[in-house]
Amino acid sequence: MALLQISEPGKSTDPHEHRLAVGIDLGTTNSLIATVRSGEAAILLDEQGRSLLPSVVRFRADGDPEIGYPALNAMVDDPLNTIASAKRMIGRKTADIKSLRDHMPYKFDDESANVPRIITADGPRSAIEVSAEILTALKKRAEVSLGGDLGGVVITVPAYFDDSQRQATKDAARLAGLNVMRLLNEPTAAAVAYGLDQGSEGIYAIYDLGGGTFDVSILRLNKGIFEVLATAGDSALGGDDMDRLIAEWLLDEIANDDLSADSHFLRQALVAARSAKEALTENDSTNIELSLPDGSSNKIVLARSKMNELIAPVIDKTLLPCRRSLRDAGLDKDDIDGIVMVGGSTRVLDVKGKVEKFFSKKLYTGVDPDEVVAVGAAIQADILIGNRSADDMLLLDVIPLSLGIEIMGSMVEKIIPRNATIPVTRAQEFTTYKDGQTAMSIHVLQGERELVSDCRSLARFELHGIPPMVAGNARIKVSFQVDADGLLSVSAKEATTGVETQIDVKPSYGLTDTEIEQMLRDSITHADDDINARQQAEQQVEADRVILALEGALAEDGRKLLNDDELSSLVTGMENLKAISETGDAESIKQAVSDLNQLSEVFAARRMDASIHSVMAGHNINEFSE
Amino acid sequence: MQTPFENNFFDLFGIDKTYTIDRLLLRDRFRDLQKKFHPDNFASASEQERRLSAQYAALINEAFTTLNDPMQRGRYMLASHGVSTDEENDTRMDPEFLMQQIELREEMDAAQSSADSAIDALGRLAIKVDHEFSKREASIAEILDNTGELDSGPNSIQEASLDKARHLVRELQFLNRMRSEIDEAEEALF
């Protein structure tokens, strides 16, 4: 089962060529991009030598958005068109972000829309599009500094992101034209950045407090395997909330009721709050100056002790997930060997203090908490693209929230429990509750609570064509598959007749495929970029990939695992695909690839089984020699 | 997917088909298999290989989760003897066990409401539940690992033994639930 390296269209298929792969930390406040060069992970800098790209986009009437520092600088002057913290909105329904919206200066479009959109000078924009702009800017940075097209990327997401937030992040990458090899959980990425360098073994807690999200993961590190035992968190908790609490205090101090409705002033207060919070990591107190709309200015002194008091609710709220993750891992605080601190918000002194006190363990803060996640993602990207042997490292991650479906009485029946190692497949049988029932609607939910209304609705779909039977006689098998990105797909099958429904769970309130297609078409600016030619090239690459893989497999195991008939039928199928791939259009190549895949399925499965035997055989030899 | 390992988790890991297992060995084998089959090894492979690797990795995860957990392992082994634990339709339990459950539950309520010593009381209760759990694990092993009797003893004895094991496995499930309720009660104290 050799790992094959295949290049994208227009690139050579030389397997020894170093392919460009990057890791992206798409953060609430700042984003970073990193790559592995000559075995060393490095953050890629912008033209001014800066590593961070503020996750801020300013949409302008001329259609050319400002991204990063220029947008950050425009935040106070142009609050309505300058969008920050899009990560807090991505993959969320309009109603979900209601409380969040109350703290944001933006104007949102239609309340009932599936995807909330902010009204800007350049039209309504969703969080997915804002994120796509940030990813596009990072992609350009990488292409300039690495001097070539990117073969693939690993994008990090909070471990506690649910299915729709993950899907939305992947959609943003698709809009930015990136080939996502993996969505990687941020705490796991941080562990990779720490663990590989130091060859640590043991059990570690990764405490990751960013601008808008909090994760804690418990990992076991052993012989290059990073095994996540449990994860917990809050995907709407972070440094932003500290800023907001400080800003609210500032407003109280000024005691001017008119100001709380003034979006310019609110933005100014938030920016001042963040600066004050940063200053207080060094100093015991700081001076805050705010200019009021009437032209006067107001000076306020904030002592660190006062700030600690203000932000205590945020820090305390992180300790509950810490306890829960330990419990889910079946461990005590004593079992933990160390705490890795990640995310800009862990610079706040009281965060370090309280976490250290909670675990009574050493804190690891050696790697820059802003950079560590991007570095880990770059290392993973380097492996996935095939520049480095996968034997060096393996990440075994988990699903953060339970998945289930709605049953009678608006209750949720869990099918996959939280903290199950991914990829995971689980099936469960259900039956009809009415005589002669021929259809069944299936409602997929994510969350820990028992009531449907307390969980997140991911998708609804219907299974038709169930043969009419007495209530309770039909057997409907619903299978959940969660892939290594933590993304769910569901299929349902009626067992007596084989009626099947397969759906990729597109969140009920995400962008539809059609919307994404349209956006992609809109974004193709070069008139000569023919979408058909591109699709044909993509299919040819897949055909080459399949042919190469099969040739290799046949050379290795063809004689061992196949009889003469099977062998010759596969060779014929392969020649057929070769011929079609040279001349056919995208659709016919796709069909031929799928035909050959079907033809070779049994062979591929036999090779997998043989491989399991060889792993076990390897064991027996080792054990005798030890 | 059709693979000979789908219904044979013990063979998948190359370990003996016994209730008593070497969990460290199981973990080692699990890792070796995932090192080979995890989708990360196939990120640049063909669509078919990526799909198959995801299926196999999921099977390896499921097999590991099942064998690594004493309750699930018991249920799995009973199923291979043709005995279903059938929790949904058969809710009968041994009266003595039910009495004990009620007592444990009363103890938990008392522990939770004892103002200063709640955490200690819950801790003691957890140890008690763990002890009951281990006792049943040992009894299940005695039955399921006595292969001489299970494979070639008289039918009536086989049936009686398996039924006893079935009850014990279901009791493990009750104790598991109790244990996680204690953990939750502890968490609620903070």
Image (cartoon, coloured by chain):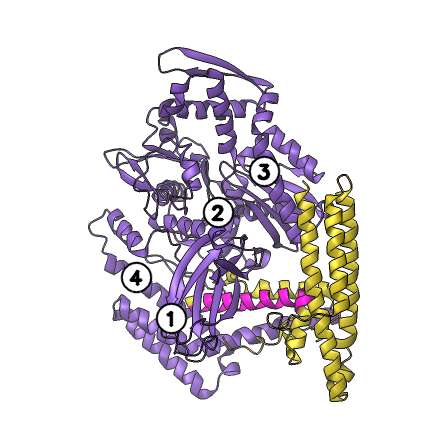
**Labels 4, 2: one chain:** yes
Q: Label 4, label 2: how many angstroms apart (C-alpha)? A: 29 Å
For residue A487, say whether it is visible. no
Q: Which chain is purple in the picture?
A: A
Q: Label 4, label 1: how many angstroms apart (C-alpha)? A: 41 Å
Q: Quadrant of residue A438?
A: bottom left
Amino acid at the residue labelled 3: Lys
Amino acid at the residue labelled 4: Ala
User: What range is drawn magenta here?
Assistant: B48-72
Looking at the image, residue A305 sits to the left or right of residue A298; the answer is right
- Residue A389 locus on image (x, y percent): 54, 58
For disc 2, the neighbor class at 10 Å (few under 14, some 14 to 19, many from 20) is many
For residue A466, say whether it is visible. yes
Label 4 resides on the chain identified as A
Label 1 resides on the chain identified as A
- Residue A550 locus on image (x, y percent): 43, 73
Pair 3/1: label in front: 1
Looking at the image, residue A299 sits to the left or right of residue B173; the answer is left
For the view shown, which residue lies furthest in the top direction?
A296
For disc 4, the neighbor class at 10 Å (few under 14, some 14 to 19, many from 20) is some
Against B148, residue B44 (above or below) is above
Mark 2: secondary structure: strand
- Residue A538 locus on image (x, y percent): 32, 61
Against A171, residue A553 (above or below) is below
- Chain B, chosen colour in render: yellow
The residue wearing badge 4 is: A537
Pair 4/1: label in front: 1
Disc number placed over residue A317 in the picture, else none: 3
